[in-house]
Image: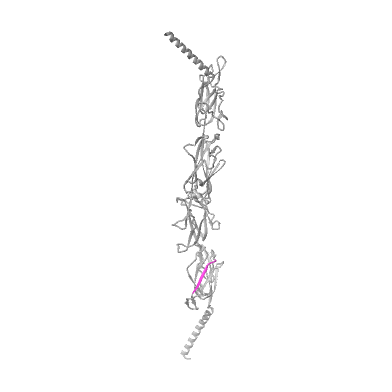
Amino acid sequence: MSIINKRSLNLVLVLTLLLSLILPSVSVGAATHQNTGSLTIHKFEREPGATAEGENQTGPSAGVPSDAKPLAGVEYEIIQTHSFDGKDWNEVTDGEVRKVETGDTGIVKVDNLLVGRYTVQEISGPAGVILNDEKFSVDIPMTYNNGKDLAYDVNIYPKNEKIRGEVELTKVNEKGEILSGAEFELFKEDGTKESEELFTTNNYGKIGAQSLAAGKYYFQEKSTVGDYAVNNSKINFTVKKNQDGKEGKTEIVWETIEGFTEVDSDNPNNIIVTNYLKPNIEKNVEGDTTYFDRDQEFKYNISITSPGDIKKYSKIAVTDTLDERLEFITDGSITDGWEVTGTEKGNVTLTQTGQKLEWSVKDITELTPNTDIKITFTAKIKPNAELKEGESGIPNKANVNFNNNRGEESEKDSTIIVTPRDGGIKILKVDKNGGATLAGAEFKLTKDADGETIVNANGTTIKINGESQTGNLENLATNAGGEILITGLTPGTYYLHETKAPMYTADDGTEKPYRLLTKPVEVEVIDNVDNQEVIVENSKSGWLLPTTGGLGTILFTVIGLALMAIALFAYLRRRKTAE
């Protein structure tokens, strides 16, 4: 065999050997190539900032992160963009389109997909998650992580973050001044608490809640501060996916309440909540004094300041229950005895039940916010009104009762004290010469110098020597100490008339009367002085001074005239003799 033939044989053997190695591989490759495959989508949700375990994993079984939750209801659109013939990828323009949706387990499997390249895109999903609107590509088949084997059943594990939003609330008064210390609770739409935390406005009047999942919520005021009324209206808001190209992934949508809430123009996540003052009430007495004589009429003034949100109230009324020692003055008609300013009198109704007076506003919408409503009525201290131990006067309280129709139903009150004016006198009967006290003198007390109008104690607080009295104050006798104490008198001018003089024992042992006073003693009763001393002096006399207008007066007149006649006769006779 020639050398050339040997070389040719060797070349054939080498080629045969190479073919024996190559052909099995080609045969195997051709045997494992498929025309279709499947795509399984494992969809789950994760909190923002969760661990990156399992991110971007693909393959037949990449595994699900431990903190993932199945996410149902996510719809995908799968479109074929390239075909694969086992060797080359070729672009297609009319590729297959599939739409699928994840089930309760968060998984959906798409079978019988022609081998090729596909785009996968989320097109809709539940409200509580942020959708990924970016397309991504998946190849069928896909090379295993070892770089050699092909997977025709492909698994993908796309993740979605839950929508999380944060809100802020700022508490102010109607002047826009911040209110710190107001307390709120946060609820889900169904009324269950989102948090057990009690949110209290800070020094900037703010509260805030973070990481709220998509959904509907409301804040509700539990308590407020100072004289501000609670407003428990639901402050509703929704945490939702951002739309219309707004900045951020989420947005907060507030339901505003006219006159109560408004969205901060600089921060749409912040709601500004206004609180209004409660109605205020002040009661006083018209004039410059609270001291009055019993049975003297005076006027009470009650002023109510209507709050800024008065037109939203369901009730506002004033109640004044007079002390039993006070009396409402009216001519018997319930429409008289009082007046009102700040609204039409016809818009206010007065109801009287015993000592209780109640003025109710009929149409609250007719009231003007932040104005005063003034009620004035006439009263007096009853003649028999007495102060109790420790009292400085008779208290009287007025209340404003209201319901702001938003959780505040209460009352405020204002008290004023009126004091009855009275005084007293202590009559001391003494001997003019020796100063000895004289018992048994009798007097009457009148309001006039003529002694016609005798003071009457019926239905009054007048007492004689500490004992209550009825009837006219006459025949008042001095005691063993020569005293009479009269208290409970209305301040003013009185006249003390002696009606019986005391007796004394003369040197000859006979009982003789002191001279009876011929003129009354004028007495000034001073308020709050119960024992102003009035000293009445008497002179001794051997005979009784006649009473004006009595028989003794006539006798003295006759004697006087007779003496004058005798004197005149003597004078005329002397004159005649002289001539």
Q: Which percent across, then down, holds residue 307?
A: 48, 48
Between 386 and 326, the one nearer to me in the picture: 326
Residue stretch in magenta: 72-80
Q: Quadrant of the C terminus?
A: top left
Between 180 and 342, the one nearer to me in the picture: 342
Q: Which percent across, then down, holds residue 404?
A: 52, 50
Q: Which percent across, then down, holds residue 42?
A: 54, 68
Q: Which percent across, then down, holds residue 250?
A: 48, 61
Q: Is residue 448 visible?
A: yes
- From this view, report whether residue 165 is shown above or below residue 287: below
> Is 76 a magenta residue?
yes
Between 554 and 313, the one nearer to me in the picture: 554
Q: Is residue 181 visible?
A: no
Q: How is the image coloured?
A: one colour
- From this view, report whether residue 568 is shown above or below residue 296: above
Q: Which residue ends up furthest to the bottom in the rendered image?
A: 1
- From this view, report whether residue 318 is shown above or below residue 568: below
> What kind of secondary structure does the magenta stretch mostly adopt?
strand
> Is 73 a magenta residue?
yes
Q: How many marks?
A: 0
